[in-house]
């Protein structure tokens, strides 16, 4: 989250029917889903949510957040629910809260898999019952139907677990019988607030829906929506600029028309929604893949900087041989990576910019099936990183560890292991809805 407070006030002045937030994503990797925690600071989240709860009370409309706590697990939902209660007490608000939960029991997902209800999406990893059972957290992505059920409770605040980015916005216009293609397309454009405008960091946009289309109006004073900024958002986190799949169907914007109404607003018509059967929701799952120990060393001697890859490759070969000889490990029991920061740490062999850096940081990542093994291998790697020469004939060099001890235990590292859909007889079958009155 993050928003321009003045822009939010302009939005409130337009008398919205709902305030909708997308609170999370898989962008930050699998650890948050694997652990069931938020990546955001509680204090920062509380400050921003406090402002939105005040805005909700002022507007007298529902406030809904999807994918609460970054990952949308039940534990992350409870984290935000606790913050919500705390703020309500501070503001003296009595609030009705609908809590939509998205977490899935791995045992039930194994049963669904064995009954043929789980199907792979494109480029999905191979899975089996054991893969599913090993997940520390699995969530199903709620769509408009589940958000609509929460809105129907008459709640002031809706805290939803994992949802599609669009669901929190699309639900209300669909409930009111407005144009389905416009509802989903407008929701896609508005999912990240003002990211569809010329001042993307302002955070607030008004999306107005009707029987034929929708209109986008950024709320920041110095922000404008243009046909380019609006149409381009279909490419945001979407591999196809014309088709977007959601629970129960897909959006097709092939024939959408983007018209500038003035210097700041864009009108969109021609979007189409196609229902599909059976009704499916996406599953996301994460599990522990290994445990890691990391070390960082800095090379500044120009000869070593110039030959950093040769140096790293030699260390990798020698240390792996020592690990297998002294610890009796096979090559698939562990891994050692030496990433050259300043040369190819981001892209590895794909790097094309080979400008010479004045120094190279070498990030060593040791992964193994237990933390004890990873730490032991890290300790075996340590003297290589500190003193390993390029050749046997030269004097022993000394490089720089930036901290002591040189190795840090990262603990468990997680990997995504589900990119599949779950077929449901009823949209609420994989979700639970609880209504709480607080204050």
Image (cartoon, grey):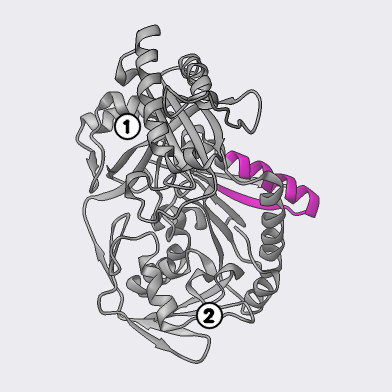
For this view, does 426 lie left or right of residue 50? left
Query: Which residue is identified by label 1?
Result: 109
Magenta highlight on residue 122: no
Q: Which of marks 2 and 1 is in front?
A: 2
Q: Which of 367 and 411 is in front in this view?
A: 367
Magenta highlight on residue 79: yes
Q: Which of 177 and 322 is in front in this view?
A: 322
Residue 397 on image: x %, y %? 54, 27
Q: Can residue 233 be seen in this view?
A: yes
Q: Which mark is residue 217?
A: 2
What are the residue bounds of the magenta stretch?
Answer: 78-98
Dot 2 falls on a residue whose secondary structure is: strand
In the picture, residue 65 is in which quadrant? bottom right
Q: Gap in Å between the C-alphas at discs 2 and 1?
A: 42 Å
Q: Which of 390 and 195 is in front in this view?
A: 390
Residue 206 on image: x %, y %? 54, 75
In the picture, residue 108 is in which quadrant? top left
How many C-alpha atoms fall within 10 Å of the one at disc 2: few (<14), some, or many (≥20)?
A: many
- Give the residue drawn at x 56%, y 40%: 300
Kindly report the secondary structure that dominates the magenta region of the rendered protein: helix
For this view, does 77 lie left or right of residue 349? right
How many C-alpha atoms fall within 10 Å of the one at disc 1: few (<14), some, or many (≥20)?
A: many
């Amino acid at each position: 989250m993050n928003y321009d407070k003045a822009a939010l006030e302009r939005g409130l002045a337009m008398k919205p029917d709902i305030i909708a937030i997308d609170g999370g994503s898989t962008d930050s990797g699998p650890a948050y889903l694997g652990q069931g925690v938020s990546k955001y600071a509680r204090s920062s989240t509380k400050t921003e949510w406090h402002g939105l709860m005040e805005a909700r009370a002022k507007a007298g409309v529902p406030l809904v957040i999807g994918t609460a706590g970054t990952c949308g697990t039940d534990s992350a939902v409870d984290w935000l629910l606790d913050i919500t209660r705390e703020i309500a007490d501070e503001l003296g608000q009595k609030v009705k809260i609908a809590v939509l939960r998205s977490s899935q029991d791995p045992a039930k997902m194994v049963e669904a898999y064995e009954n043929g209800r789980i199907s792979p999406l494109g480029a999905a990893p191979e899975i089996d019952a054991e893969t599913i059972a090993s997940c520390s957290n699995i969530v199903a992505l709620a769509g408009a139907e589940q958000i609509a059920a929460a809105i129907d409770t008459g709640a002031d605040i809706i805290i939803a677990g994992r949802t599609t980015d669009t669901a929190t916005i699309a639900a209300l216009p669909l409930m009111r019988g407005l144009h389905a293609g416009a509802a989903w397309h407008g929701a896609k454009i508005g999912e990240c607030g003002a990211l569809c405008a010329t001042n993307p960091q302002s955070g607030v946009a008004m999306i107005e829906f009707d029987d034929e289309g929708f209109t986008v109006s950024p709320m920041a004073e110095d922000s404008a929506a243009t046909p380019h900024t609006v149409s381009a958002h279909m490419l945001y986190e979407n591999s196809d600029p014309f088709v977007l799949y959601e629970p129960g169907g897909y959006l097709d914007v092939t024939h959408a028309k983007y018209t500038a109404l003035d210097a700041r607003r864009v009108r969109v018509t021609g979007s189409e929604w196609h229902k599909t059967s059976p009704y499916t929701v996406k599953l996301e799952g994460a599990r522990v893949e290994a445990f890691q120990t990391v070390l960082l060393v800095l090379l500044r001697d120009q000869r070593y900087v110039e030959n950093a890859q040769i140096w790293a490759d030699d260390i990798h070969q020698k240390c792996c041989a020592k690990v297998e000889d002294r610890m009796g490990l096979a090559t698939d029991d562990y891994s050692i990576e030496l990433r050259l920061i300043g040369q190819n740490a981001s892209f590895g062999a794909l790097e094309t910019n080979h400008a010479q850096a004045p120094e190279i940081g070498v990030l060593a990542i040791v992964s193994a099936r237990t933390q004890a093994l990873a730490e032991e291998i890290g300790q075996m790697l340590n003297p290589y990183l500190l003193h390993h020469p390029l050749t046997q004939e030269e004097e022993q060099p000394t490089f720089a560890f930036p901290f002591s001890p040189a190795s840090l235990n990262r603990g468990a590292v997680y990997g995504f292991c589900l990119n599949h859909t779950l077929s449901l007889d009823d949209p609420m079958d994989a979700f639970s809805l609880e209504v709480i009155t607080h204050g």
